[in-house]
Amino acid sequence: MARKNIVFEAPVYTLEAALNAVQHGVDRLELCADFGEGGTTPSAGLLKEIKRQVDVPVFVMIRCRGGDFLYSDSELEIMRTDIGILSAHGADGFVFGILASSGEVNREACARLIQAAEGKPCTFHRAFDLVPDKKTALETIIGLGFERILTSGGAPTVSAGFDMIKKLNIWAKDRIIILPGGGLKPADLPRLNQYGALEEVHSSCKQFRNSTMDLPDTGLKLSLIKEMEGKVLTVDPQLVRSFRAILDELG
């Protein structure tokens, strides 16, 4: 029986994080901006430089702002335009999710962005975790042509949402990739793989390193996220290697 390759995707927010992730074993990057908002659309310049330096696929977050996932027509036009710009700068795929005010998947809005992607693979992101009826949403997302759903099973972490992730795999019947992500830990991988449905995983493996700037402590706080004050968001190489080792063993 042929061994399978379980794809390891990591969301990254900086060039440093992207290079660290790829160097230590990540198969695909999800490029984002604004860690504090859970990811928004990154700059074309960052994408272009990452594509120049790495040889793995780079999927790009398309989200014009943080907050909710209910967008105006003008905001949708921003995201459609961003897809075109970022595609021209080498994006290999796109990550987005649009909901109606009721929390259902906004079929028409998602279709507009999928059309703008012009055949490049699209992932429905963790907005899915807010949808009340996940089985219906799954069918809608499959029908729209998304290739994968990033989900923690509607729970704060993959571990807590394991039962729903298992159901989604059963309901999907190999028609779409269920991509577990959200607080994922290396120790979760064997359990996710035990029923043979694990194709891809998603983990930031984030780490905050100290700034190398040599400045006196003024007491001035410029970051809204306490853990990021005076630090730089990057990737923990050891954690990436831990994921890689277990994935290779499971594969």
Image (cartoon, grey):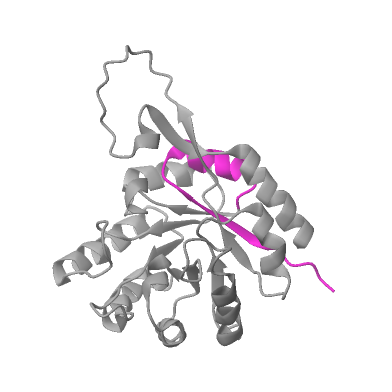
Whole-percent x and y of residue 227? 40, 36
Whole-percent x and y of residue 165? 56, 74
Whole-percent x and y of residue 71? 21, 69
Q: How many marks can you see?
A: 0
Give the farthest residue toward the right. 1
Q: Is residue 125 visible?
A: no
Tell me if 41 is positioned left or right of 189 in this view.
Answer: left
Q: In this rendered view, identify the residue nearer to me: 175 or 170.
A: 170
Q: Quadrant of the C terminus?
A: bottom right
Tell me if 216 is positioned left or right of 124 in this view.
Answer: left
- Residue 156 sits inside the magenta stretch: no
Whole-percent x and y of residue 174? 61, 82
| Residue located at (16% from left, 70% from top) | 72
Give the farthest residue toward the front. 160
Depicted 16 relative to depicted 103: above or below:
above
Q: Is residue 128 visible?
A: yes
- Residue 3 sits inside the magenta stretch: yes
Tell me if 194 is positioned left or right of 37 in this view.
Answer: right
Q: In this rendered view, identify the residue nearer to me: 199 or 114.
A: 199
Residue span colored magenta:
1-26
Q: Quadrant of the N terminus?
A: bottom right
Depicted 136 relative to depicted 202: above or below:
below
| Residue located at (67% from left, 63% from top) | 6
| Residue located at (78% from left, 57% from top) | 249
